[in-house]
Image (cartoon, rainbow, N blue to C red):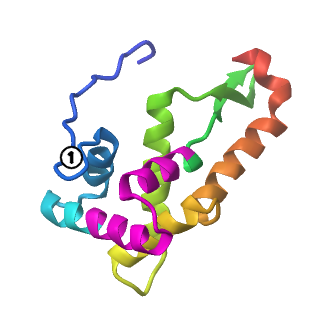
Amino acid sequence: MRGKKAIKRKISQDIKYSSINVEKFINRLMKDGKKSLAREIVYNALEKSSNELKENPLNIFDKVIDNVSPSVEVKSRRLGGANYQVPVPVSPDRQVTLAIRWIITAARDKKGMPMEDRLTREFVDAFNNTGAAIKKKTDIEKMAESNKAFSHLA
């Protein structure tokens, strides 16, 4: 299994903002092939957060992705019968993927309101460097920092 390369698929830009990352976000949010519903949820959430923060929706989205993107992560390495958590730098593509995953997971974990409102809250929180997705990023980076002694095993 080692050495297998992931297949790069070409992702087009989204309709409204002409952004590849927004399209990736919509695709990740989509359930059961209902892309138009996912697109509506994301666009409305961006508009609501734009009204709340008085900022351009695309700028909000880009800043949120930047704020949530981790610079390092830990990978498990087995050496001599022991498992070590080895910190490794994160590639830019993976940074975006992790950020999108964490934002959507954080929004889905909030209960009691429509997804659009949960996503809006998560966008505003991540824009202000608070919230569950930012906590996930800081937890990962703290873990990498505490295991810095094993970085030579990478």
Left or right: 110 as drawn, with respect to 4:
right
Q: Identify the image quadrant of the N terminus.
A: top left
Rendered location of residue 109, percent (x, y)? 48, 71
Left or right: 119 as drawn, with respect to 36:
right
User: Do we see residue 108 in this rendering?
Assistant: no
Rendered location of residue 56, percent (x, y)? 39, 58
Rendered location of residue 94, percent (x, y)? 47, 33
Determine which residue is flagged by label 1: 14
In front: 8, or 17? 17
* Image point (80%, 24%), residue name: 150
Q: The residue under label 1 is which amino acid type?
A: Asp
Looking at the picture, does residue 121 appear above or below residue 17? below
Left or right: 23 as drawn, with respect to 104:
left
**What crowding class fits label 1: few (fewer than 14 Cα within 10 Å), some (14-19), or many (20 or more)?**
some
Residue 55, by quadrant, is bottom left
Residues in magenta, as a range: 42-66
Q: Identify the image quadrant of the C terminus.
A: top right
Rendered location of residue 24, percent (x, y)? 30, 44
Looking at the picture, does residue 151 appear above or below residue 121? above
* Image point (63%, 34%), residue name: 71
Q: Is residue 70 magenta?
A: no
* Image point (44%, 30%), residue name: 93
In front: 6, or 69? 69
